[in-house]
Amino acid sequence: MKKRLEGFILQKELTSLEKPLYKPAKNRRNSNEEPKYPATVAIHDPSIFLEFSKPVILTRSKEFALVGGADTYYWGISTPDGVQLTPKKDIHYTNSKDRSGMRGLEIPEYVSAYYGLTEGDRVEFGISENIVFIKSVNGCEDPKVFREWKPDLSEFQSDYPLEPLMIEKFGDFDLRVVTLMAPIGLGSSYWFIAPGGSGKTWILVKVYDACLKLSLEDERLYILMAYIGDRPEDAAQYREVLEKYKDKGVRAENYKAPWDTNPDTQVDLTGFVMKRAQRLTAIGYHVVVLFDAISRTVAAHTASHYADKDSGMISGGLYRDSITEMIAKKFGTHGSYGASRSLTIIGTVLSASDNKKTSESVVDQETSDSSTTGICRLVKIPTLQRPWISVNESETYTRFPDGRDFRSEDQRKEMETVKKKMREDVGSRDSSKAHEILLKYAKDNPLPKY
């Protein structure tokens, strides 16, 4: 009898001294050489971070099991000759009182090395007789294929986007307004920046909906949505959007760690999502990650046990280490990695309002210019004179270095036409009138002309 179940891979972070010892199976000199592989654990679902921190999961992995019952189960591997028991006969689960050899959720090093597992992999497990084995990795059942996958993006060269992410093609008014000023390319780091109550989450929900529609048209697209550090009830909006397309075979996943969770949880989940995004990109997807909110992940890191308290603080009470770890190392991995893969990061960032500054707004002040390829800055308007959405046109832009313009000729012409109307009809002093012209053009031309 065969059983099947799914899970995700979690791994211990290697130190700078351990990394040179890391040897996947294909890089070992001979089959008898002992692999050096990070501690690898299988978890049923990333929601486990809401109960246990990553260090606790890794430490206590032997106390839990993927499968259980009256029998004893061993770890095995799937080879061209069928499922085989591993040479050391490691016990995955035993019903006896003596569990000294049990690995539980921990996957033996040589099993991890054989499959080339890395954190973020989605794996399907099989059970043949009393052997637990990995049936597929990220949907692929051929070990010859997934053993050749790159674990991350370190061997690829990042570049500016080569093609657009066409979120405006479905006729949504607000997305049309945004992309007329600052289109998003595959491989962008794109931030919606605004003070609280300006519609950041509202606009990101629309972006998510459009991305899901695009993924149904393009099998190369994979969408990840992470809701970090905000109101628990707001996460329901993203869940409802995904539910609309779930039965259509959409390639998308939702993750959440709202503000009523431990800061360590928020950092752990952010790290896991980015590891998964990088892995999926490395194996050949155009991955789009949406984060609500990027600024809260930095604040969570400062409040967590992971922050290096000796790194010094910057203005606003954030540790400098938090900016490095979250903005640079995690969100700084965006880019186009050739025609077949890219990592796009779209997120919300809190800015300071006129009378209130927070630690989160420091992320905007310190990093928005240096960490992004595109920005849409929203304006909080206390009256109803200007319809939702209100865009600060002078601070909404996409960078197009020489020779790095992903727009078509028709898209460039349309953007130039709109900007010319805004400049020539009202001049540069009346931003309110310029905004009205932008909105009118979007209303009269709901679909792009390219």
Image (cartoon, rainbow, N blue to C red):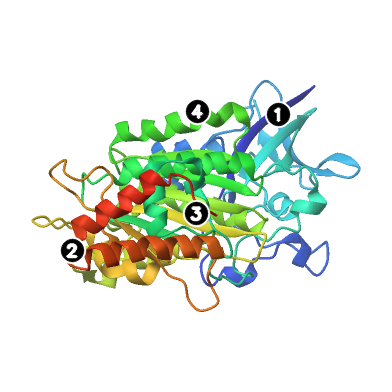
Q: Estimate the x, y position of residue 194 in percent, counting from the top left.
A: 25, 54
On residue 274, which mark appears?
3
Q: Amino acid at mark 2?
A: Gly
Q: Amino acid at mark 1?
A: Arg
Q: Does residue 256 appear anywhere in the picture?
A: yes
User: Residue 26: horizontal and vertical position, in percent?
Assistant: 78, 63
Q: Residue at x 77, y 67 (%)?
A: 28
| Amino acid type of the residue that numbered disc 3 sits on in the rendered structure | Met
The residue that label 2 is drawn on is 316
* SS for dot 4: helix
Label 1 Cα crowd, 10 Å radius (few <14 / some 14-19 / many 20+): few
Give the CA separation, mark 1 to mark 3: 27 Å
Which element type, helix, strand or loop, lies under badge 1? strand
Amino acid type assigned to the residue bearing label 4 in the image: Glu
**Closer to the camera in the image, 103 or 280:** 280
Q: Earlier in the sequence, mark 4 or mark 2?
A: 4
Q: Which residue is mark 1?
A: 4
Please identify, in this view, whether the residue under mark 4 or under mark 1 is nearer the observer. Answer: 4
Q: In front: 28, or 121? A: 121
- Residue 429, compared with residue 61, is above or below; it is below
- Tell me the distance, in whole angstroms, between the alpha carbons under discs 2 and 3: 26 Å
3 vs 4, front mark: 4
C-alpha gap between disc 4 and disc 1: 24 Å
N-terminal label among 2 and 1 = 1
| Residue 179: image location, x then y, percent | 42, 55
* Residue that carries the numbered disc 4 in the rendered image: 243
Q: Secondary structure under badge 3? A: helix
The CA span between labels 4 and 2 is 38 Å
- Mark 3 or 4 closer to N-term? 4
Quadrant placement of the C terminus: bottom right
Position of residue 383 measured from the top left corner of the image (x, y, whole percent): 13, 43
